Image (cartoon, helix red, strand yellow):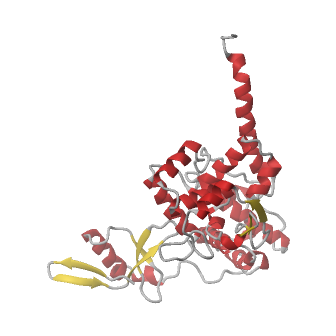
Amino acid sequence: MPTFRMRDGTGSFRLKHVVEDTDRHGNVRVYLRKPGQPKVRLKSQPGTQEFLDEYRRALHDAPDKLQAPALDRRGNKGTFKWLCEQHFASAEFKRLAPRTQYVRRRILDGVCEKNGKNPYALLEARHVRKMRDDRADTPEAANGVVKALRQIFNFAVEYEFADRNPARDVPYIRSASDGFHSWTMEEVAQFEQHHALGSKARLALALLLYTGQRRSDVVRLGPQHIKDGWLTLTQQKNRSRKPVTLSIPVLPELEAVIDATPTGNLAFLVTAFGKPFTSNGFGNWFRKQCDAAGLKHCSAHGLRKAGAALAAENGATERQLMAIFGWSTMKEASRYTRAARQKVLAASGMKHLSRDKG
């Protein structure tokens, strides 16, 4: 636990109960954490007078706020909070991946802050739409609430706590964004020009691009996953509920990069301390490698999209894309094959638009 010191007219002094936490995006946040009490976020810049004033207010001016729990520990039967507790204790919830459990708990706890004491049986579609629309400025968060409510009421109907799902017919908000930027081959070449063959960054790029896997799978890949020129893995996503195991050939491009690069024993990619990356830690590290190459708009996930586009443009069918990327339906694969077909058709058809018939 770090020690924070401040200076005023009387000299230097230590700030008690001040701690740092790093969130999943790598951002450092500062809190006041007194034993037995909830953490209080300190938003001012440490070392400034504003920070000291905020610290003193949190420490001395609002003891009741610090001591009062945000929510009752248990909800009364029939309340939305009670339904959440039943869901969290269910076998269905416990089969979810830890990351999925964390995200769903966080969303539903947020709903409970305003609606936890209300009877869940009275929740209607208009209420769900209101919760969604209140978050319309952040479509991902808005859709996350709708999805979490759909899931908990699916559970409620299955376990006969409810006879309907009020969130089922509430649509998601369509985002104006296409999501993560899909790398172009020119951007791949720019990254490779900056990060030489044999570097960890170059290996990371090759693993992402030439396997088509998510960063949560790439960080776990190691020599033990390759046998007789084939790479076999069970994808991390939905591993606890509907595991997907893939076997894909190791492309010569990837094999050449692996052979030229120092790697870990059980994971190709390791930190400076020789430990495998976490998924979030790798994402933050790779983001810095993109920045160093002048590709500030590129990310690890965008390479998966680039790989799918490249495969589709080279003639991969929807079934082949599903086999490579582990998709369970054709919906995602068809996005790339449609785009690839459009490009091919446009290339062959543009001659009919030309005025030069020679």
Q: Nearer the viewer, residue 133 or 26?
A: 26
Residue 213 occupies quadrant: bottom right
Q: Position of residue 7 (x, y in %)?
A: 20, 78
Q: Position of residue 214 (x, y in %)?
A: 65, 61
Q: Nearer the viewer, residue 212 or 89?
A: 212
Q: Residue at x 78, y 49 (%)?
A: 331
209 sits to left or right of 294 = right
User: Which quadrant of the rendered structure holds the C terminus?
Assistant: top right
230 sits to left or right of 49 = right
Total numbered circles? 0
User: Is 90 rendered above or below residue 150?
Assistant: below
Residue 336 occupies quadrant: top right
126 sits to left or right of 189 = right
Q: Position of residue 273 (x, y in %)?
A: 48, 77
Q: Residue at x 53, y 68 (%)?
A: 281
Q: Nearer the viewer, residue 34 or 283?
A: 283
